[in-house]
Amino acid sequence: MHRFFVEPSGIDEAQISIRSPEDRKHMLKVLRMRVGDEIEVSDSLKFEYVARIVAIDSDEIRATILKKHQFQREPKLQTTLYQAIPKQGKMDVIIQKTVELGVTKLIPVLTERSIASGESLSGSKLERWRKVAQEAGKQCKRGFIPAIGPGVSFQEMLPQFSEHDMVLFPYEQETERTLKAVLRTASESPQRVAILIGPEGGFTDKEAAAVEAAGGLPVTLGKTILRTETAGPAALAMVMYELEL
C-alpha cells in the first residue's frame, strides 16, 4: 500500500480527508487510485492508519479508517545529521539515504570549504531538499517526515551540540578512536546523537579544533577516506546498528 501524510486536522475517529492538491493529483493521475483502494496514512505525530477510499470529490479524497496503531517503524534513538553543504545534487542522495536509515533531523551547514553560498541555507533549495525527504519518507514508510533545516553557519552550529547526549565527528585525521569503540564504551546509552560530516575538502584545522572544543568526539569510520555523500549514511548506519538494532 502507498503511504500518505495528512495533518491531524484531517483525521477523525472514523474517517480521513486528504485535501492536499499534490497528494490528490498523485493518487488519481499517477497511481490511478479509485474508490475501494486501501492506503496507509500517517498523522506525523503518533499514529498511522490503514484506510479504504470511499469518496473522491473535486477538493478532497475521503477514506474510512480500518486500522489504527502507533508508529511501528520509527527508531527510539533521536539522530541529527549536521551535513556540510556539498556540491549540487549530492545532498539529494544524502537526504534520501539517511531518511531511509532513520535520521530524525538533517541540518545543512555552511563551512569554510563549502562550495555552496549562503543562499543554500534557505529558499528554493531548502524547499527542494524537504520535498526529497518527504518522498523518501513515503517510500520507506516512516512515521513522520524528518525535518530538513533550517540551515546554519558553522558558528551557529556549535552551540547546538549541547542539545545532544553525544556528538560524533568522523574526521580523516583521527586514526585511533573508532566509532565502534566510542559507542560501545559509553557510560550511558545516549538517546540523542548528532553526527557531523564535512564538505568535499574537509574541515579546516581551525574548524576541527572548534568542534572538539564544543564537545565533538573525533572518530574514524575505517581505513579508507569516504566521500561526503557516503560518510553520513555510513556513520548513521553504524550508530543505528549499535544503539538501535
Image (spheres, rainbow, N blue to C red):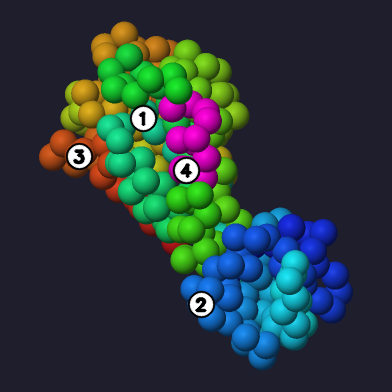
Closest to the camera, between mark 3 and mark 4, is 4
Check the image and report above or below for 148 versus 206: below
Specify which label sits upstream in the sequence, 4 or 1: 1
Task: Find the magenta span and give its range.
Answer: 120-130
From this viewpoint, is residue 26 visible?
Answer: yes
Closest to the camera, between mark 2 and mark 3, is 2
Residue, x 61% and y 56% (percent of image)?
Answer: 144
Q: Which residue is mark 4?
A: 128
Q: Which residue is mark 3?
A: 226
Q: Amino acid at mark 3?
A: Leu
Judged from this view, the residue extending furthest toward the bottom is: 36
Specify which label sits upstream in the sequence, 1 or 2: 2
Element under label 2? loop
Closest to the camera, between mark 4 and mark 1, is 4
Check the image and report above or below for 159 versus 23: above
Residue, x 37% and y 53% (percent of image)?
Answer: 97
- On the image, the x and y values in percent for residue 27 come to 57, 73
Is-magenta flag for residue 127? yes
Q: Tell me if 2 is positioned left or right of 235 in this view.
A: right
Q: Amino acid at mark 2?
A: Leu
Closest to the camera, between mark 3 and mark 1, is 1
Disc 3, disc 4: CB below 8 Å?
A: no
Q: Which residue is mark 1?
A: 85
Specify which label sits upstream in the sequence, 3 or 4: 4
Element under label 4? helix
- On the image, the x and y values in percent for residue 238 come to 34, 50
Q: Tell me if 7 is positioned left or right of 165 in this view.
A: right
Give the overall secondary structure of the magenta segment: helix
